[in-house]
Image (cartoon, grey):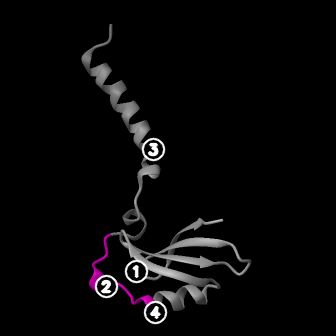
Amino acid sequence: MKSRNQELSIFAGLLAGFVAIAGPAFADDDDYCGNIPRSEWKSISEVASAVEAKGYQVREIEADDGCFEVEARRENGERVELYINPRTLDIVRTKSRS
């Protein structure tokens, strides 16, 4: 028979494993961009210029969950959604929108 401590250790190990596997599936955009105060965000025109300078054609820009979300097309015509850090203008995540 297992002791209470052994049962708790097994449960804690299973829980940690679940969090490690499932955590990224539940991540929101704040995990990519951080919690940057709006007063430190760049302007939408600066975002557009930065994205276009990286070879994308900008279709739409909106602020959502701590990031700028940019719907754009690559040079080959592929549709993508870019998540842009509002302070640094770095692309922190790219999703294909085929």
Query: In the depicted view, which residue is nearer to us: 41 or 6?
Result: 41
**Is residue 29 depicted above or below 72 in this figure?**
above
Magenta-drawn stretch contains 61: no
Counting residues from the N terminus, which is met first, the one under dot 1 or under dot 3?
A: 3
- Disc 2 to disc 4, C-alpha distance: 15 Å
Residue 86 got which mark? 1
Contact? badges 3 and 2 (CB < 8 Å): no
How far across and down, in percent of the image, does residue 46 sit? 46, 91
- Disc 3 to disc 4, C-alpha distance: 36 Å
Quadrant in the rendering for residue 19:
top left
How far across and down, in percent of the image, does residue 47 sit? 47, 87
Q: Which residues are magenta?
A: 35-45
**Is residue 28 depicted above or below 89 in this figure?**
above
How far across and down, in percent of the image, does residue 12 sit? 33, 31
The residue mark sitting in front, 4 or 1, is 4
Residue 95 horizontal side relative to residue 98, left or right:
left
- Disc 3 to disc 2, C-alpha distance: 32 Å
Counting residues from the N terminus, which is met first, the one under dot 2 or under dot 1?
A: 2
